[in-house]
Amino acid sequence: MSWQPAAEPVHSLLLKAILTENPIPAAYRINYVANFYVGPLVAMMEASFKLTRAEWIVLFCLTRQPRLNAQQISIVTGRPKTSIASAVKKLQRRKLITRVTDVADSRRQVLHLTASGREMYQSIVQNFIEREKAMLAGLTAAERQELTRLFDKIIRTAGDWAKPY
């Protein structure tokens, strides 16, 4: 059985020890929450849909902003270019996306979701929505709004630390 947050008193004590006087208090907490949020979702996608995290990221981005290329997706997600490029190739093979020449700039290739890609996205996204609701259940509506506002501020004021790798 895998460890879950606060599953036992000893784990609560261990987590408290790790969090107390931590030299990276915000970053560790962000990563902790993100790991418990996304880990089970990625496992579900891989088992049920044979979809990797990078492939999901491409689908997600294309539902929010069509006509992106792989480099743009890498830049706006902070994911390695190689993993996004590999995901694009796999999604194309599965006919979940297409890559076409941009009508505005013939040197550029842009990505589009296919009907199958949109269907897959719809089949998966509700799991993310429900997990986010569960993750934020301990916060009031005002606290959830404030959390989003603070993350937006961190993102908006990102400096050298937020460069794609």
Image (cartoon, rainbow, N blue to C red):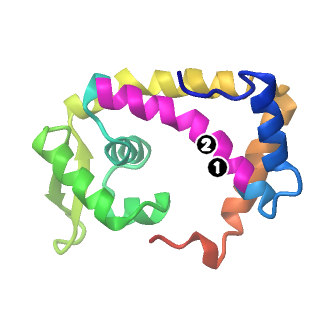
- Look at the image and tell me whether residue 145 can be seen: no
Q: Which residue is mark 1?
A: 31
Disc 1 is placed on an element classified as helix
Query: Residue 14 versus residue 103: which sits nearer the camera?
Result: 14
Type of amino acid at the residue the image marks with label 2: Ala
Left or right, 52 with reference to 7: left
Type of amino acid at the residue the image marks with label 1: Asn
For residue 134, what is the image quadrant? top right
Whether the magenta-drawn stretch holds residue 75 is answered as no
At which x and y percent is residue 35?
58, 41
Left or right, 139 with reference to 36: right
- Look at the image and tell me whether residue 110 can be seen: yes
The residue shown at (75%, 22%) is 8
The residue shown at (46%, 30%) is 41
Query: Residue 57 versus residue 53: which sits nearer the camera?
Result: 53
For residue 10, what is the image quadrant? top right
For residue 34, what is the image quadrant? top right
Helix, strand or loop for the magenta stretch, by majority: helix
The reply to whether the C-beta atoms of the residues labelled 2 and 1 are less than 8 Å apart is: yes
Residue 84 is marked as none
At which x and y percent is residue 163?
53, 73
Query: Residue 126 versus residue 114: which sits nearer the camera?
Result: 126
Q: Is residue 20 above or below residue 133?
A: below
Q: Which residue is mark 2?
A: 34
Which portion, as a residue range, is magenta?
A: 28-47
Query: Residue 93 versus residue 110: which sits nearer the camera?
Result: 93
Mark 2 residue crowding within 10 angstroms, few (<14) / some (14–19) / many (20+): few
Badge count: 2
Left or right, 45 with reference to 107: right
At which x and y percent is residue 36?
60, 35
Left or right, 13 with reference to 6: right
